[in-house]
Structures are given as structure tokens and as C-alpha cells.
């Protein structure tokens, strides 16, 4: 991230404006679209960060990309970023907007990583268990990592709960490497 404080301030301003205008949900959808666009299409990020492309040309290109896809508030915000020369921070601002939106709506992101994909019923059970321990809504992300062998890794806020077989094997490997019994024999 180039400038997290800048991204946070612009995102906060956009959250406040969207809330005031009653367009928070629509602007959030636009910011999710921009996050997805920057992840799936690296050429857009290159365009945003390019010092060679003139601001008026960037504005035309972005207007063509976003035409009919984003809210008027979001379109005006993107134009403002280009005018202020901050368009290179758009992916970070979109990400920060998502974080601030989640805080405002009392949503907690939970990521569960397993060795094999989980079916919907198990995911729903995990979601209800996690929600029962807190008063927040839970947004569940899933990932698959075959290296875990079995079990799961649950990440939420700043907490990590690792109940994977890989971690157990690594713990055993460390215990063997320490070999605490050798000094006792000498």
C-alpha cells in the first residue's frame, strides 16, 4: 500500500458522503467491483499508476470502463481522485472503504482454510458457531490448502486458531529437533 493514511481518509469521506446520501449499499457494491477489477485486470492498476498517461486521458478511459456500471457518487469520487492526482490509490481506497463499511455495519470477516472444500451445511454450521460467540454478523471466506493434510485454520480479526494436522506435525518436528533428553543423559 502506497499511503494507508491517505486511503483511510478518502475512504472515510466516501463512507460519510454515501451514508448521508443514502447510497451506502450501492457505493459498497461499486467499491467491491473496483477491488475485483484491480485484482483480475492488472492493466487497470498499471493505467492508474502510470505517470505517462495524462489525467484527462485517464478520466476518459475510466469513464468508459465504469460507464453504466457504477453509482453517480462513485463516478464523481473517481473523477475527484483523477483531478487531485490520487487515482493511483484507488485500489487501496476501495479496500479501505470495505473495511470501514464492515465496521459501520458490524460485520466481521472470518477466513477458514481447510485441506478439502467444505460443503454448504458445514460452512453454515461454522458460521452460526462463530456468530454465537459475538454480536457481529459474520462474512465467511473459504480457502483450500492441501498442505494442511486435515483440520482447519480459522482467522478472524487479529486471531488465528490453527487446528491443522500440519501444525501438529510441525510441533512434533520441533520437539524432535530440540531433543531435550540428550542433555539429561550426559
Image: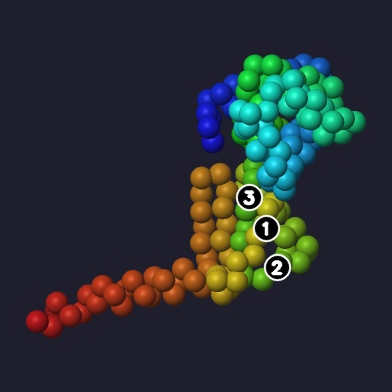
Residue pictured at 53% horizontal, 32% vertical: 2
Dot 2, how many residues are within 10 Å of its Cα: few (below 14), some (14-19), or many (20+)?
few
Question: Split into 4 quadrants, where in the image is the C terminus?
Answer: bottom left
Q: Name the residue under label 3.
A: 110
Q: Mark 2 points at which residue?
A: 117
Query: How many angstroms separate mark 2 from mark 3 (CA)?
Result: 16 Å
Question: Split into 4 quadrants, where in the image is the N terminus?
Answer: top right
Query: How many angstroms separate mark 1 from mark 2 (CA)?
Result: 8 Å
- Residue 67 disc label: none
Q: Name the residue under label 1.
A: 142
Q: Where is residue 106 in the image (x, y as percent from the top left)?
A: 67, 35
Q: Which of the two discs, 1 and 3, sits closer to the camera? A: 1
Q: Which of the two discs, 2 and 3, sits closer to the camera? A: 2
Q: Where is residue 131 in the image (x, y as percent from the top left)?
A: 67, 48
Residue 98 showing in the rendered view: no
Q: In which quarter of the image is residue 72?
A: top right
Q: Which residue lies furthest to the left in this view?
A: 186
Image: 92 above or below 129: above
Quick one: label 1 or label 2, which is nearer the N terminus?
A: 2
Q: Which residue lies furthest to the front in this view?
A: 52
Q: Is mark 2 on a helix, strand or loop?
A: loop
Q: Position of residue 64 (x, y in %)?
A: 84, 31
Query: How many angstroms separate mark 1 from mark 3 (CA)?
Result: 8 Å
Residue pictured at 65% horizontal, 38% vertical: 46
Which residue is more in the foreground, 130 or 66?
66
Q: Are marks 1 and 2 in contact (CB under 8 Å)?
A: yes
Apparent side of residue 110 relative to residue 148 in the rendered image (left or right): right
Residue pictured at 59% horizontal, 21% vertical: 9
Amino acid at each position: 500500500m502506497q499511503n494507508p493514511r491517505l486511503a483511510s481518509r478518502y475512504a472515510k469521506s466516501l463512507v460519510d458522503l454515501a451514508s448521508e446520501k443514502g447510497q451506502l449499499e450501492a457505493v459498497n457494491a461499486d467499491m467491491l467491483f473496483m477491488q475485483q477489477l484491480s485484482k483480475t485486470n492488472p492493466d487497470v492498476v498499471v493505467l492508474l499508476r502510470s505517470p505517462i498517461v495524462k489525467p484527462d486521458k485517464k478520466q476518459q478511459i475510466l469513464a468508459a470502463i465504469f460507464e453504466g456500471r457504477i453509482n453517480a457518487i462513485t463516478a464523481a469520487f473517481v473523477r475527484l481522485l483523477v483531478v487531485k492526482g490520487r487515482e493511483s490509490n484507488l485500489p487501496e481506497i476501495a479496500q479501505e472503504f470495505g473495511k470501514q463499511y464492515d465496521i459501520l455495519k458490524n460485520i466481521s470477516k472470518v477466513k477458514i482454510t481447510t485441506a478439502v472444500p467444505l460443503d454448504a451445511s458445514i460452512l453454515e454450521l461454522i458460521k452460526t458457531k462463530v456468530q454465537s460467540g459475538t454480536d457481529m454478523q459474520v462474512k465467511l471466506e473459504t480457502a483450500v490448502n492441501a498442505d494442511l493434510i486435515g483440520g482447519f485454520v480459522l482467522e478472524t480479526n487479529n486471531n488465528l486458531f490453527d487446528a491443522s494436522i500440519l501444525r501438529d506435525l510441525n510441533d512434533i518436528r520441533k520437539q524432535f529437533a530440540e531433543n531435550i533428553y540428550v542433555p539429561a543423559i550426559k
